[in-house]
Image (cartoon, rainbow, N blue to C red):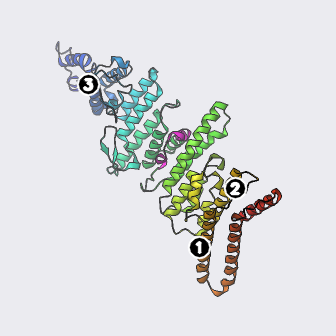
């Protein structure tokens, strides 16, 4: 058609000339087919872009018209390769049947098609969001998975070829266009998809406004994500993660709680907070596996969630235990700094029992756990009943006290004679405190008056502090 028009093979020259025949064929055959319309649109766009609107625009109109038809009227073949989907005879057409075929289009044509579909207001926003998700999966591989991420059609995509600045610029253009097309309606896209876009934005160095929009939207839907979604690789090193971006997403989620809300909304936000706490503690556990991750950053990251947010500290304990396991050379001061984040009273009985027998925990934390266990046992047994001491707990404290004393002695041996007296005094004091704690746990089982028992409990708590 383009060549015939260029050569002016029109009706003015001869009746039944090529242009008229091609136009008739184009209208009656090409535009009536689904895949033919897409193929013609791609070909015309590659040759002339928007300048050949006599072909491009009719193709777009034909594609939009077919997308807006009820699924019961879809009688042509289409591409649909979702994982787990198997086409069966007489099976109903999926609502998003059209999303994979139009993902083949250039981003400018894709935007024109989707914008026209949205303007008709006949399809729900989540369906528009699914079209954006399919297009993104095809054209923007996830940096988190490097060169082994399967695309929407099962094809393996790779970032190994994106070294050229031209390719990076093209991907940046695709990303920023997709972000501007995200519907503002709640639930139109998932939190996981938004975090994926944020990872790509970080990788291709998208504009600050694009990243800010993604951080804000991902923060409002953080409860829909998983811990792995918060792993945002750095552009300079895909094996390292951008902790600042994850913190920014969490801050935007927490900012929602500073605004007044109706009781129903408050209940929904409370449920969302419980999910986010679990997600973030799992994220901490993943970050803790990095042997190069500094303890200061880990503590700051753990403190991003306010104390009131965590109803239990089981997830936080597992994250800290993982960090201690992966960083065996931590000093005692650093171990205590980490374990001070754990509220022993917010651990479940199973996790508390595990922590008591954990040799990686500092002595002070072990003793605090034992006191909590003793208090709960006393409370369960009744305020006037005698509670037998937990011999296993007492033995554990004694063993850890001996270990602590040996370590103190070993450290003293490496110091000069000038420091020996002071270190000896400190070791004596530590040993005395630990022995006092042990005696409080091994208290006699003879019945005592309420007044005496209250005084003893107050004394043991003061010694614990």
Upstream in sequence: badge 2 or badge 1: 2
Q: Does any portion of residue 262 appear in the rendered image?
A: no
Q: Nearer the viewer, mark 2 or mark 1?
A: 2
How packed mark 3 is, by other alpha carbons closer than 10 Å (few <14, some 14-19, many 20 or more), is some
Residue position for label 1: 403
Say left or right for 153 vs 254: left
Q: Is residue 230 magenta?
A: yes
How packed mark 1 is, by other alpha carbons closer than 10 Å (few <14, some 14-19, many 20 or more), is few
Q: Position of residue 211 (x, y in %)?
A: 50, 44
- Verify CB contact (< 8 Å) between mark 1 and mark 3: no
Q: Nearer the viewer, mark 2 or mark 3?
A: 2
Where is residue 402, by image quadrant?
Answer: bottom right
Q: Which residues are magenta?
A: 216-231
Residue positioned most to the front: 446
Q: Secondary structure at mark 1?
A: helix
The residue sitting at 57% across, 59% down in the picture is 355
Q: Nearer the viewer, mark 1 or mark 3?
A: 1
What is the chief secondary structure element of the magenta stretch?
Answer: helix
Query: Can you say which quadrant of the picture contains the N terminus?
Result: top left
Q: Does any portion of residue 281 appear in the rendered image?
A: yes
* 163 lies above or below 419: above
Say left or right for 184 vs 444: left
Q: Secondary structure at mark 3?
A: helix
Where is residue 98, by image quadrant?
Answer: top left
Front residue of 42 and 232: 232
**Where residue 36 is drawn, which disc sits there?**
3
Front residue of 462 and 202: 462
């Amino acid at each position: 058609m383009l060549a015939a028009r260029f050569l002016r093979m029109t009706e003015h020259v001869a009746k039944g000339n090529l242009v008229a025949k091609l136009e008739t064929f184009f209208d009656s055959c090409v535009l009536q087919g689904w895949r033919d319309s897409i193929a013609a649109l791609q070909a015309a766009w590659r040759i002339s872009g928007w300048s050949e609107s006599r072909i491009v625009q009719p193709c777009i109109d034909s594609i939009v018209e077919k997308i807006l038809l009820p699924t019961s009227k879809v009688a042509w073949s289409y591409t649909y390769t979702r994982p787990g989907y198997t086409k069966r005879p007489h099976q109903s057409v999926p609502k998003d049947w059209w999303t994979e075929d139009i993902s083949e289009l250039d981003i400018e044509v894709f935007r024109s098609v989707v914008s026209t579909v949205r303007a008709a207001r006949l399809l729900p926003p989540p369906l528009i969001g699914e079209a954006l998700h399919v297009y993104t999966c095809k054209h923007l591989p996830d940096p988190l998975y490097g060169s082994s991420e399967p695309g929407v059609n099962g094809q393996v995509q790779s970032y190994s070829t994106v070294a050229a600045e031209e390719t990076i610029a093209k991907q940046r253009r695709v990303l920023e266009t997709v972000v501007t097309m995200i519907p503002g309606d709640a639930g139109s896209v998932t939190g996981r998809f938004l975090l994926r876009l944020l990872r790509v934005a970080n990788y291709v160095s998208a504009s600050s406004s694009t990243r800010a929009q993604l951080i804000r939207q991902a923060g409002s839907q953080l409860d829909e994500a998983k811990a792995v979604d918060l792993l945002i690789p750095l552009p300079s090193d895909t094996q390292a993660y951008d902790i600042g971006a994850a913190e920014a997403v969490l801050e935007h989620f927490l900012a929602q709680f500073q605004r007044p809300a109706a009781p129903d909304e408050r209940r929904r936000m409370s449920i969302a907070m419980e999910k986010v706490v679990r997600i973030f503690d799992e994220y901490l556990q993943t970050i803790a596996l990095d042997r190069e991750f500094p303890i200061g950053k880990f503590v700051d990251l753990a403190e991003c969630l306010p104390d009131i947010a965590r109803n239990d500290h089981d997830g936080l304990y597992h994250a800290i235990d993982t960090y201690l396991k992966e960083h065996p050379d931590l000093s005692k001061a650093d171990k205590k700094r980490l374990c001070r984040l754990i509220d022993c009273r917010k651990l479940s009985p199973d996790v508390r029992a595990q922590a008591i027998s954990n040799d990686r925990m500092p002595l002070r934390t072990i003793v605090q756990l034992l006191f909590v266990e003793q208090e709960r046992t006393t409370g369960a047994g009744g305020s006037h009943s005698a509670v037998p001491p937990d011999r296993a707990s007492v033995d554990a404290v004694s063993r850890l006290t001996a270990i602590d004393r040996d370590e103190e002695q070993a450290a003293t041996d490496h110091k000069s004679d000038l420091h020996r007296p002071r270190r000896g005094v400190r070791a004596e004091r530590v040993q005395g405190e630990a022995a006092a704690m042990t005696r409080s746990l091994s208290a006699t089982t003879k019945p005592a008056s309420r007044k005496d028992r209250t005084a003893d409990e107050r004394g043991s708590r003061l010694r614990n502090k």
